[in-house]
């Protein structure tokens, strides 16, 4: 969980509840406004992209979904870069930057562009790993690391070996 509260958290949570209840259109409207009203909230931009992605998956052809998600990520990564620069002592911005970069890997995974998946996944992962090492009390860093460990454990020997190079413990479950 995030260890700090930010202006707009209550609005972001309202949107999250909407998209978890499959009211993605309402979530997007809430988040569109929240991005304007609370641009320094660390969760609002990634949550906006995720809500739009979920909505598009339900309503659009696959190629439209990937294109839209890619454009949204291209929109939010510079926002997070700016926030990291402006607030270097707040690790949550770097965590969400890493998560946004990692989500770009998901775009390339969906398109079966393996090299780009690896490059963007590594870039996002290293950002999150840096936050996890410096701020172990931020439990939100553990989910992406756990997902990487899990999928590395399901992969071939070379991928498991590479995960071990990052001191990860690939799961064989």
Image (tube, rainbow, N blue to C red):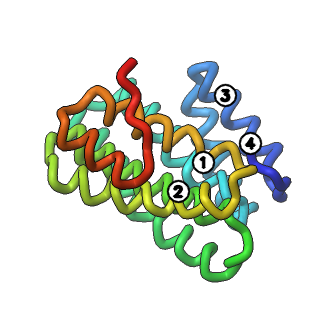
| In front: label 4 or label 3 | 4
Q: Residue 114: where, in percent of width, then height?
A: 15, 47
Q: Nearer the viewer, residue 156 or 34?
A: 156
Q: Which residue is mark 1?
A: 141
Marks 2/1 in contact by CB < 8 Å: the verdict is yes
Q: For the C terminus, which image quadrant? A: top left
Residue 164 seen in the current view: yes
Q: Secondary structure at mark 2?
A: helix
Q: Secondary structure at mark 3?
A: helix
Quadrant in the picture for residue 79: bottom right
Q: Which residue is mark 3?
A: 18
**Residue at mark 1 to residue at mark 3: CA–CA distance:** 24 Å
Would you place residue 37 above or below residue 139 in this image?
below
Would you place residue 41 above or below residue 142 in this image?
below
Would you place residue 153 above or below residue 9 in this image?
above
Dot 3 alpha-carbon crowd within 10 angstroms: few under 14, some 14 to 19, many 20 or more: some
Of callouts 4 and 3, the N-terminal one: 4
Q: Residue 152: where, in percent of width, then height?
A: 32, 36
Of callouts 2 and 1, the N-terminal one: 2
Dot 4 alpha-carbon crowd within 10 angstroms: few under 14, some 14 to 19, many 20 or more: few
Q: Which residue is mark 4?
A: 1
Query: Residue at 75% of width from left, 50% of height from top?
Result: 137
Query: Residue at 31% of width from left, 31% of height from top?
Result: 60
Quadrant in the picture for residue 66: top left
Q: Which residue is mark 2?
A: 128
Of callouts 1 and 3, the N-terminal one: 3
């Amino acid at each position: 969980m995030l260890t700090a509260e930010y202006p707009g958290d209550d609005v972001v949570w309202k949107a999250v509840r909407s998209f978890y209840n499959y009211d993605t259109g309402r979530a997007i409207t809430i988040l569109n406004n929240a991005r304007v009203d609370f641009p320094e909230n660390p969760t609002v931009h990634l949550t906006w992209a995720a809500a739009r992605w979920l909505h598009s998956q339900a309503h659009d052809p696959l190629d439209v979904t990937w294109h839209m998600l890619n454009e949204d990520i291209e929109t939010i990564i510079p926002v997070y870069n700016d926030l990291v620069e402006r607030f270097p002592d707040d690790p949550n911005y770097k965590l969400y930057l890493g998560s946004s970069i990692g989500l770009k890997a998901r775009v390339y995974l969906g398109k079966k562009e393996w090299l780009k998946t690896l490059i963007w996944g590594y870039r996002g992962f290293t950002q999150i790993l840096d936050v996890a090492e410096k701020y172990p009390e931020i439990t939100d860093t553990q989910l992406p690391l756990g997902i990487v460990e899990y999928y590395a454990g399901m992969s071939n020997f070379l991928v498991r070996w590479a995960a071990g190079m990052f001191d990860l413990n690939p799961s064989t479950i």
